[in-house]
Amino acid sequence: MIQQYGMKLDDTVLAEPHQLGLYDDLINNRDAKTVAGGGAQNTARGAQYMLPPNSTLYIGCVGNDEYANTLREACKKEGVHVEYRVDEKAPTGRCGVIITGHHRTMCTDLAAANEYKVDHLKQPHIWKMVEASKVYYVGGYHLTVCVPAAMALAEHAAATNKPFLLGLSAGFIPQFFKDQLAQVLPYTDYVFGNENEAKTWAETNSVSADSIPEIAKKLANTDKVNQKRQRTVIITQGTEPTLIAVQGQDKVQEYPVLAIDDSKIVDTLGAGDAFAAGFLAGIVSDDSIEDCVKKGQWLAKLNIQEFGPAYPYPKKTYGQDE
């Protein structure tokens, strides 16, 4: 199926016209299941899983259809407050995921997700909630959609000295949206990526580095607007240690990941989003970097034992349930 639709194992791509048949093919012929998704929305749901009630607000764009209702219901169940811009023309975005063993190959049709407008964010009742928030997280996918919205959050965070976090999301973001990323990067206090995204950033920016830790260090030390906070770069490497590079510090910290029996892994979809969510919950709780990493790894471990980007219910509690 991966070959049929012109993809490679573990690809994360935006759907081209010849790939749009994939979605019906998955549902009609492969018994695919429909689950709520969206990179930053997965992270919002995961952070809320670990935080007190009513801690998270998620903003994005959906169509006027059943898939949008699926997302609303998932967020309502998990306690995430949503403020969607509803686009009357485009359908809600979807991502077809082909799972082979522990590999996931993803093909995204952004549709309505590509129609977000900064005017929605600037509405008084929404911007008031933005101002009342203490931490901001933007998924890298949004850099393909509405950079002015990401910049509005970034500039507000810098002006008020609140943490601004960015997930690189996929290799094609630093590769094909290099300029958009370069616009937002100086405002970041925390940057999340995996080894592939880190390598791609280095290649597209002509950064010479012999290793992933070296790339993480160079990314951490790029120009920064808010000088009151040192930038922290977090690189996940699957089962290999999580790397932490801090601006101005020579040593890159390594944190081994939590071991899990192979038979317990359902799929790895959303593991990066879950890690960012646990880490984010730690930032909100003013935890140390080490504890933020541990929370991220704990939540990612729970996530990969579920189908799709989801978390177990009844809820497990960090520090009590493994």
Image: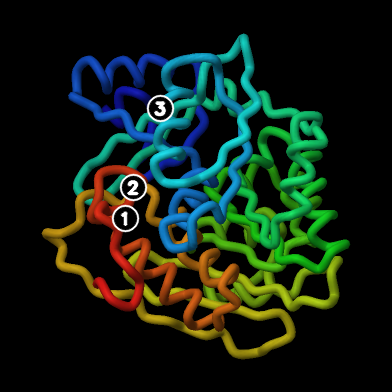
Looking at this rendering, what residue extends furthest in the front direction?
A: 53
Number of labels in the image equals 3
Specify the farthest residue to the left: 263
Marks 1 and 2, the one that precedes in the sequence: 1
Q: CA distance from mark 1 to mark 2?
A: 6 Å
Q: Residues within 10 Å of mark 3 (few under 14, many from 20)?
A: some
Image height of 89 relative to 44, above or below = above
Q: Position of residue 250 (x, y in %)?
A: 66, 89
Q: Secondary structure at mark 3?
A: helix
Calculate the distance from the C-alpha at mark 1 to the C-alpha at mark 3.
19 Å
Q: Which mark is residue 223?
A: none
> Residue at position x 62%, y 21% from top?
86
Q: Secondary structure at mark 1?
A: helix
Q: What label does residue 303 carry, if any?
A: 1
Q: Mark 2 — residue?
A: 310
The one of 253 and 282 positioned closer to us in this rendering: 282
Label 1: few (<14), some (14–19) or many (≥20) C-alpha neighbours in 10 Å? many
Q: Which residue is mark 3?
A: 70
Tell me how far mark 2 sits from mark 3, CA to CA.
Answer: 14 Å
Local crowd size for mark 2, using a 10 Å CA cut-off: few (<14), some (14–19), many (≥20): many
In what quadrant of the picture does the N terminus appear?
top left
Label 2 is placed on what type of residue?
Ala
Residue 130: x %, y % from top left? 74, 48
Compared to residue 64, the image places residue 214 above or below, namely: below
- Identify the residue at horizontal 68%, vertical 41% (top origin): 143
Question: Which three-letter amino acid code belongs to the residue tagged 3?
Answer: Thr
- Residue lying at 66% horizontally and 36% vertically, measured from the top left: 144
Dots 1 and 2: beta carbons under 8 Å?
A: yes
**Looking at numbered disc 1 in the image, what kind of residue is underneath it?**
Asn
| Residue 294 left/right relative to 125 | left
What residue is shown at x 74% (from left), y 78% (from top)?
230
